[in-house]
Amino acid sequence: MKKPTIMNRVLIVIQLSTTLLVLASCGGRPGGPGGPGAAGPSGPPAYKSAEVYSGSTTMFYNYPATIQGEQNVEIRPKVDGFIQKIFVDEGANVHTGEPLFELRNPQYEAAVRSAIAAVKIAEADVQTAEMDVEKVKPLVERKIISDYELQSKQYTLNSKKASLASAQADLVNAKVNVGYTYLTSPANGVIGTIPYKVGSLVSSTSANPLTTVYNTKNIYVYFSLNEKQLLEFSRTVKGATLKEKLATMEDVSLILADGTEYPEKGRIVTASGLISTETGSVSFRADFPNKLGLIRSGSSATIKIPVKLENALLIPQNATYDMQGQKFVYKVNDKDSTVNISVNVSANPIGNLYVVESGLKKGDKLIVEGVGNLKPGMVVKPLPTNTDSLYADAGKHK
């Protein structure tokens, strides 16, 4: 095998150098055809550009939320007693009037028997007093005895009747106390935990309730907005007053803990009138139906609030860059020269788009790709971009 001569080696080096120069001029730098800022044989680099989107769209506000049932009724005994029977188990579905617990307290049963005996004695006393009145009446009519005797017997009868009424009231009270030993469900719902077992002594002053009945036919979703969010919310939603704003709002959605969207829609119905000095936020409540009982009280979720924007200005997120905590874009002027503009955008993006609050207007042309390679005053060749695909997320939320 012949060794390459010095001349051959020089030719090989020249060929390699020429190849590297060609590759570098084509795509090895940001100005090559392979990336934004491509320049022609002579002229400024080309960058994709598009006008600011102006039109109707829908913005979604997402806030963490907690869920409570329509009713959370604690079951507490009104009288002291030992738990004799537990008719339900934890997590069971119950209906209004369904038995839950039975307590045992012999004292109340004895009080009923004593009250019954007192009523019978009082009834006998009333009958005796009535007989005395009837016996005296004819004697007074014949003037055998004075009216004083009849009045005395009448007063005695009235006293006995009052004693009978008191005894009857004591009997009712004794029976009510016995009734309190039999606890039923005050509402339809689901049984919570049951901390006490059969044989436990409970009273109205016990630390824990016997259980809690959660009525979740409808659920209340609570969420809060801080002052900044409340101001943005108030500016965005139509209406002069908070009541009008809530009335004009569309139905809201609920994102469950597993990331799925709850199939039922809800309405925001109330808002607290004051900003809490402790949390610096305002509490809102949205109501959702829960016919299938899918959601339980105490769950957590995210509420998704749609707000329609009629004349929104939208820009791609790729068109922005951050500097000292502020967002900037590169606007293209009439001479195809770049001008960096400070913009304020909403904290809630729409897909890959920002909602512009200030800094731009309808018709402004922006560089939408490769802004990291630009400098203010740089002359570029704008390449129009397909706005249908660029602003597709805006159309999805109309």
Image (spheres, rainbow, N blue to C red):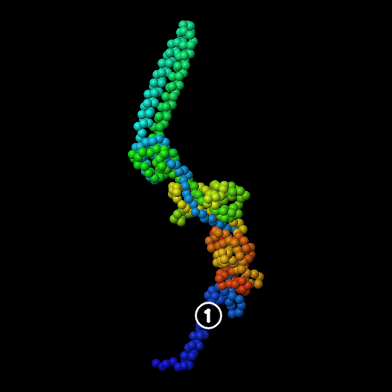
x and y, in percent, of residue 267 in the image? 53, 49
> Which quarter of the figure has residue 333?
bottom right
For the point 45% across and 49% down, which residue is it? 298
Task: For mark 1, give the secondary structure.
Answer: helix
Q: Is residue 188 in view from this perspective?
A: no
> Which quarter of the figure has residue 198?
top left
> Which quarter of the figure has residue 25?
bottom right
Q: Is residue 351 in view from this perspective?
A: yes
Decide which of 44, 76 is in the foreground and name it.
Answer: 76
Residue situated furthest left in the rendering? 199
Question: Label 1 amino acid?
Answer: Ala
x and y, in percent, of residue 230 in the image? 57, 53
Residue situated furthest right in the rendering? 334
Judge left or right: residue 211 versus residue 37: left
Q: Is residue 48 above or below residue 1?
A: above
Decide which of 180, 184 is in the foreground and name it.
Answer: 180
For the point 44% across and 92% down, which residue is it? 4
Which residue is identified by label 1?
A: 24
Quadrant placement of the C terminus: bottom right
